Image (tube, rainbow, N blue to C red):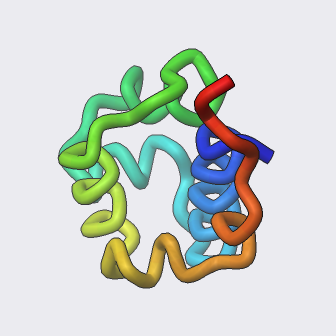
Amino acid sequence: MDVSRATITRLRALCLSKGITVNGLSYRAGVTQSTVNDIFTGKTHNPGIATLKKLCDGLDISMRNFFNSPLFEDLEQEIK
């Protein structure tokens, strides 16, 4: 799995576990719905760190908690 897919998977799982929709996350995080949609659909492959921080704030978790997942343990090599 690459970092983009791991990020999407983690965001989806957190939203599901907290009962938050994509629209709800965008509202809570102060990020446009189109930006969140682009991340969730994979159109945006590399969301900026500031955007990711806002999403974590919207999910009421720390960035440390976000990345504390097995999804990020064995990522594919990005440099090919």
Q: Could you tell me which residue is drawn at 45 percent across and 42 percent down? A: 23
Quadrant of the rendering where the C terminus is positioned: top right
Considering depth in this image, is 14 or 21 the residue closer to the camera?
Answer: 14
Q: Is residue 46 above or below residue 1?
A: above
Q: What is the quadrant of residue 58 in the picture?
A: bottom left
- Give the x, y percent position of residue 15: 58, 64
- Give the x, y percent position of residue 40: 60, 35
Asked if residue 30 lies left or right of residue 2, the reply is: left
Asked if residue 70 lies left or right of residue 59, the reply is: right
Asked if residue 64 lies left or right of residue 7, the reply is: left
Q: Could you tell me which residue is drawn at 34 percent across and 72 percent down? A: 63
Q: What is the quadrant of residue 51 in the picture?
A: top left
Q: Is residue 53 above or below residue 63?
A: above
- Give the x, y percent position of residue 36: 44, 35
Q: Is residue 80 above or below residue 27?
A: above
Considering depth in this image, is 17 or 2 the residue closer to the camera?
Answer: 2
Q: Name the residue furthest right.
A: 1
- Answer yes or no: is residue 15 visible: yes
- Answer yes or no: is residue 60 visible: no
